[in-house]
Image: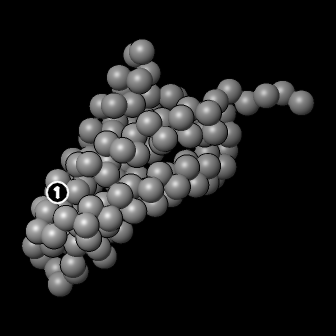
Amino acid sequence: MKRLLAFAIAGGLGFVVDAAVLALLLRLTVLGPFAARIISIAVAMAATWIINRTFTFGPSGRSLAAEGSRYGAVGLAAALFNYVVYSGLLLIVPGLSPFLALLAASASAMTASYLGYSRLVFAPRHKS
């Protein structure tokens, strides 16, 4: 339960990073909500890897490159799911705030990402 709480906190911090980067990009660049979200997801993913590695799961015992690759793969799958939900909401509900779509999409991807990170990235390595 402690690990799930730490993961939720890391996710919350990742959400703040995601929303802040999205807001900055929408305000300071010509990027629209779709292109800006791709960048904000990438920045948030890097932030949550550091947080989850440090506080939630601990180092995996793999090389940093291997761990990062696995984290990136799981994160990419979760981010794609997140982005599809985000985009779908914006397309289906005209006038919906990008930030409400962000909230709904992020919440929907949390379970899948926890399972992926805990089982594929930070799970104890099996000895052959």
Answer with the quarter of the image where residue 56 lies.
top left
* Placement of the N terminus among the 4 image quadrants: top left
Left or right: 119 as drawn, with respect to 4: right
Query: Residue 87: in sight, yes or no?
Result: yes
Crowding at label 1, few (<14), some or many (≥20) Cα neighbours within 10 Å?
some
Q: Whole-percent x and y of residue 23?
A: 14, 64
Q: Residue lying furthest top in this view?
A: 1
Which residue sits at x=39%, y=62%?
84
Answer with the quarter of the image where residue 89 lies.
bottom left
Q: Whole-percent x and y of residue 125?
A: 73, 30
Q: Nearer the viewer, residue 36 or 68?
A: 36
Q: Whole-percent x and y of residue 22?
A: 21, 64
Which residue sits at x=36%, y=44%?
108
Which residue sits at x=68%, y=27%?
124
Answer with the quarter of the image where residue 116 lies.
top right
Q: Secondary structure at mark 1?
A: helix
Residue identifier under label 1: 99
Name the residue type under label 1: Phe
Q: Nearer the viewer, residue 66 or 25?
A: 25
Q: Nearer the viewer, residue 121 or 97?
A: 97
